[in-house]
Image (spheres, rainbow, N blue to C red):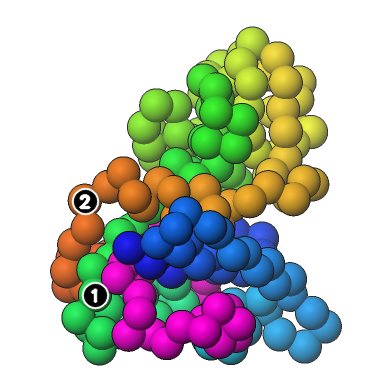
Amino acid sequence: MNILAFDTCLNKTYVTLLLKNGTAKNKIIESDGENYHSAYLITTLVKILRENNLTPKDIDVVATDIGPGSFTGIRACTTVARVLTQQLSAKTVGVSSLEILSQILKSDDVVVLDARKNKAYVYDKGILGAVELEKVDEIVRGRVVITDNSLLERISKNAKKAISYEQNDYPLGEILALTALKKEQTDWKMLKPLYIQPPPVFGK
């Protein structure tokens, strides 16, 4: 099957086309001075399909990151995936960004991402939720931890080793696509964003 996978929840837009023959085609888009990287998702999807002589109808499964991460990115991912799979009558798979990052080193790693409000999103063989940073300090003690730039210094004080995914070019789109192969494929109606904490509310 042909899998189209994309992620705008993290620090960049990751797009991967995993072809039936097992070949993976990847694109990574960074934010520029004018737009956040998720603004380029649609044009990047069109480009990767054209470059591989495919049309949307050739896609069997759409895989996407459902969060946690940027609220704008989560909305972009899930909305585009739902619309695509609805129009194409294709299947979809949602994968947590925490699970994606947990597979970077393919070992027994803890994933810790900044959740703000003195909390972090934690994955340790499963999603633990938004955890107070004081408790996170104990969870990561003596462990190998995948984190982000904002928590790297703090996590490094207690972890055996702390690595920021933002400082390396990991194939996160490809990891997403390969993870989707192992998961149950669902109807577009079943794809939901993963808001571990509620989105911010603006106004009074």
Residue drawn at x 44%, y 41% is 99
Instruction: Please tell me whether residue 48 is drawn above or below residue 115 in the rendered image.
Output: below
Q: What segment is highlighted magenta in the picture?
A: 47-74
Q: Which residue is mark 1?
A: 90
Residue drawn at x 67%, y 79% is 36
Check disc 2: other Cα within 10 Å, few if <14, some if 14-19, many if 20+: few
Q: Secondary structure at mark 2?
A: loop
Kind of residue sitting beneath label 2: Glu
Taking the view exactly as shown, the residue that stands out farthest to the top is 142
Q: Quadrant of residue 106?
A: top right
Query: Is 79 left, or right, of 149 in this rendering?
Result: left
Instruction: Please tell me whether residue 197 is drawn above or below residue 153 in the rendered image.
Output: below
Whole-percent x, y for residue 181 in the image: 34, 50
Kind of residue sitting beneath label 1: Ala
Taking the view exactly as shown, the residue that stands out farthest to the front is 21
Q: Quadrant of residue 85?
A: bottom left
Query: Is 5 left, or right, of 39 in this rendering?
Result: left
Q: Which residue is mark 2?
A: 184
Q: Is residue 180 visible?
A: yes
- Residue 10 is labelled as none
Residue drawn at x 38%, y 85% is 56
Instruction: Please tell me whether residue 151 is drawn above or below residue 181 in the rendered image.
Output: above
Residue drawn at x 70%, y 72% is 29
Query: How much space separates mark 2 and mark 1, taking CA atoms?
Result: 13 Å
Whole-percent x, y for residue 76 in the image: 46, 77
Taking the view exactly as shown, the residue that stands out farthest to the right is 33
Whole-percent x, y for residue 178 in the image: 44, 48
Query: Is 124 left, or right, of 38 in this rendering?
Result: left
